[in-house]
Amino acid sequence: MWKNNNQINYIIFLAIILAGAYLRIYQINFDDYWFDEYVSFWIADPNLSFSETLKRSYDLDYGTNLLFNISLKYFFKIFNYEPQIGRFFPAIFGILSIPLVGYLSYQFDKSKSYLFTTFLISINWYLISYSQETRSFSLSFFLSVLSIIFFIKIYDQNISKINKFLYGFLYIFFSYLGVVNHIFIFIILLAQFLFLLIINYKNKKNISFPSACIFAILIMYFITMWQPLMLQVSIKNYWISQIEIDFFINYYFSRFFGSKIMGTIYLVTLIYLIFNFKNKVFIYSNKYLFLLTLLFLSYCLPIFYGFIFMPILTDRYIIFVLIPILLLISIFTFNLENIKIKKIILFIIIVSTFSNNYLEIFKREHSKPEFNKTFENISKTNFNYIYLKASDGLNKNLLVNYIKSIKNFDNEKFIILDSNENIKQSDIWLVCYEAINNFDCSPGKEFESYSLKEKINYHLIEATLYSLH
């Protein structure tokens, strides 16, 4: 009977993983690229030398997302340099993260709660959406999970010396890749070290080996990543605004779970479960204390830094905070002694999540600029000259590089005019991506002798046909 139950659980586990994989591939190119994505596309040009790729990464990303940009470059080199192909690279890490988080849940609790954890990860719209965006955040999440998995391995005292060194190597390797990819992964390392100090203080547990591994990661990072670190520290003005008072009511849960209602459901559930299991959480030898430490530091460290220096906290930078949130919710829900409350929580979360995801996935609306639809419409006209409005030369280069690669831009038909040349054509399409032009798509002085003939509007894109008087 026990064997049969195990087989059924494995089948369910596999089915959840396959469903999560399907959701990450389904409509993967529904949206075109937005600014950050075509920046990654430009940096990861496989035709560049390695040093040129590094320079572009330093110039545009200050060395953040470095691992992702370099890896994406070689992905394009193998599979072709096209935007729609680039979307599959982050999807790989989004899919691989599903079983890994399920396994991590099983490390904490040997009950069937890992199935619920896997379900919550597989169907989470926030993780699905970042698995379909050509940016580094699904890779960051993937490496964060691996870092925690191998940290739990080396924290465990009951393993052989050979396995301890193997797990220590894997912990150092994946954690180092994580901090190279995004500096916010240091929050996870700090949470791990703080947790070790707490258990050492209370239980006199030997923490020398995991502590040495953490210091090894720090040394490796400072040796190899000193230049991008200095670039990031030198930033004086950043695009992120200071958090407001309503943040302390929501903590980005509306972003993480799809809406204010969904965010409230998950936040209230989490608070209730932590309070209900407070004795279990605050046992100093308990691994749940690590999850709570990570949850606390993920918010507090960036907030503290933001008030002292400059704001740096935004939801996607702490995407890994979903790990402690979903593990605590799933594990504690399954461990509730009150069966009625347990069933109510499961029912509310499952039904509300399915309902929200039905709207997000199958009633999806465009959230990014619709370049392909714009040029599909323009191609139906007989006017082929294109003028791209951009605030400066760099923005123009980034945009041109992306637009010339999309499927509905006919490179043999369309001619993109250089903004420095004297415009003499009788009919010109002025194409404006609103977000990079502060939503001002008015023509410049180049069009003083032109009159408006036709206008096309798609999400975040305005295309206007101008003709000479």
Image (cartoon, rainbow, N blue to C red):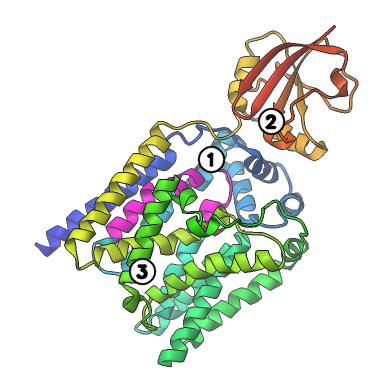
Mark 3 or 1: in front is: 3
Q: Which mark is residue 87?
A: 1
**Closer to the camera, 469 or 249?**
249
What secondary structure is the stretch in magenta mostly built from? helix
The residue positioned farthest toward the front in the image shown = 245
Separation (CA) of disc 2 from disc 3 = 45 Å
405 to 118, vertically: above or below = above
Query: Is 354 situated left or right of 321 in this image?
Result: left
- The residue located at (18%, 54%) in the rendering is 8
Q: Earlier in the sequence, mark 3 or mark 1?
A: 1
Please check the rendered image and state whether residue 143 is part of the magenta-colored stretch, yes or no. Answer: no
Mark 2 or 3: in front is: 3
Separation (CA) of disc 2 from disc 1 = 21 Å
Please check the rendered image and state whether residue 121 is part of the magenta-colored stretch, yes or no. Answer: yes
Q: Amino acid at mark 3?
A: Ile
Neighbour class for label 2 at 10 Å: few (<14), some, many (≥20)? many
Q: From the image, tell me which residue sits under label 3.
A: 274
Mark 2 or 1: in front is: 2
Q: From the image, tell me which residue sits under label 2.
A: 433
Give SS at disc 3.
Answer: helix
- The residue located at (66%, 64%) in the rendering is 306
15 to 243, vertically: above or below = above
Q: Are marks 2 and 3 in contact (CB under 8 Å)?
A: no
Q: Quadrant of residue 468?
A: top right
Could you tell me residue 74's position as x and y percent?
Answer: 61, 47
Q: Earlier in the sequence, mark 2 or mark 1?
A: 1
Could you tell me residue 450's position as x and y percent?
Answer: 83, 12
Q: Amino acid at mark 2?
A: Tyr
